[in-house]
Amino acid sequence: MYQELFNLRELPFRLTPDPEFLYLSKAHARAKAYMESTIWFADGFVVITGEIGCGKTTLIETFLSELENDIIVARVNQTQVSSIEFLQAVLVQFGFKPFQMKKAELLATLRDYLLEQYEGGHKIVLVIDEAQNLSQRVLEEVRLLSGIETTKDKVLRIILAGQPELNDKLDAPELEQLAQRIRLRFHLPALTPADTSAYILHRLEVAGSQGREIFAPDTFDLMFRYTGGVPRLINTLCDTAMLAASNQNRDQVRLDDVHAAISELQWLEYSSRTGTRLMQLRVDGSSVNGGGRSESTDSGPAYGRILLASNGHTIATHNLYAGRLIIGRTAANDLQIDSRFVSRHHCQIVTTAQNTIIEDLNSTNGMFVQGKRVRHHNFNDGDVVTIGQHELLYIDERAAQPQRSPVEEPAAVQVAHASTTVLGDHTMDTHASALDLTRS
């Protein structure tokens, strides 16, 4: 391997979840703090979600490695199980051999054990990884376990970690009682470009780089474009690029080594990969009142604007710069629409100097243009896209766009432009008129 050539103590980009290599981005630190809060609060019940490869398992390993000795941990990783198999798996973690027990005996044994440990001054934590695979029946067992209590305290702390689908399951009407017991939820996004660079340097430092410039400065942007800031993908690309450099007997990774690694892996840029549901969400992704953007820059004039309307009133506006804008139900999106008719990550708007396109991200209820469901739409000035009970009015503001006279300009856009000076208010009846005109 390349370890000796680069003068490193160990391989820096292994895929195993080693707590020593954990890089605490702002989001990772927050997720870790939420896990730790289960120890502080007796009724702690925390849900951590994240895309595949975002570092959930490494975060769990780090959290568990730092627990005090008086804390008893049960960790369940195999989650495609029946309710009885789940209860057996939990008891195995506590040192029992429960395979001949019936369900009533499993529940009684668990309850007696948890209360006994509580009386002995111990705190008990149940960590369930890959929790998105749990069936509703098993999640109901989790709820029942969370309800075991004394007259003062709950006796079991619970952490559920899994892919974003976990939140969909928890939000199902059948699991409302379980959802009400969750103290904290947090979605772990991919790393930002700055965090991606810091992540790489951190792992190299832990491996023994001692500040040496092992990756040339111009390689970081390319690596971010092809990994999307996903730690597992970063590890794979960095490891392959270091192998490519070592094949040339070089102790520094150059741009052509990264290109060689990308070619060997046969990767496309992360944002264009088929099946990617979540494109470049950022740690500071904001609500409709925020200004968070993904993979975009606000230098220079905006290419356009999106006006968000509901029930005839404009409730938010968002400038469109070169890059990608993610729209969805949760606060991790660049533009949040808090509605049950909107999927967690519903659609994305991709803006370039030439055009602006809106794309559906496999949402449940879809998006509509003039009453027709579409998966992809190239915006024209004044277009309206409906998602759920909300509407998105697009205004094109490219500097190269010919200026229209008021007579030539579509009525919807005339009204929208006329009312932009009062977007800070929530009395936007003129925008409602614009949306109505585009439908007629």
Image (cartoon, rainbow, N blue to C red):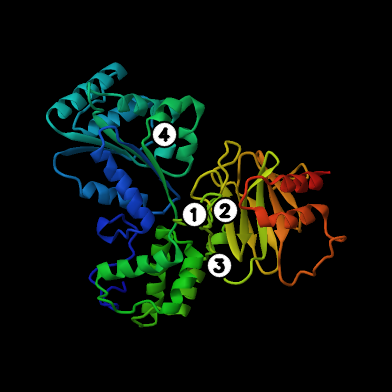
Q: Is residue 338 above or below residue 62?
A: above
The span from disc 2 to disc 1 (Cα, nearest Å) is: 9 Å
- Foreground tag (3 vs 2): 3
Residue under label 3: 297
Q: Position of residue 358 (x, y in %)?
A: 67, 54
Secondary structure of the residue carrying numbered label 3: loop
Q: Position of residue 256 (x, y in %)?
A: 47, 79
Q: Residues within 10 Å of mark 3 (few under 14, many from 20)?
A: few
83 lies left or right of 21? right
Q: If you read the primary sequence from the N terminus, does the residue marked by circle 3 or circle 2 appear first? A: 3
- The residue drawn where x is 20% and y is 45% is 67
Residue under label 4: 134
The reply to whether dot 2 and dot 1 touch (C-beta < 8 Å) is yes
Secondary structure of the residue carrying numbered label 1: loop
Q: If you read the primary sequence from the N terminus, does the residue marked by circle 4 or circle 3 appear first? A: 4
The span from disc 2 to disc 4 (Cα, nearest Å) is: 28 Å
- The residue drawn where x is 13% and y is 32% is 121
- Foreground tag (4 vs 3): 3
Residue under label 2: 326
Residue under label 1: 285
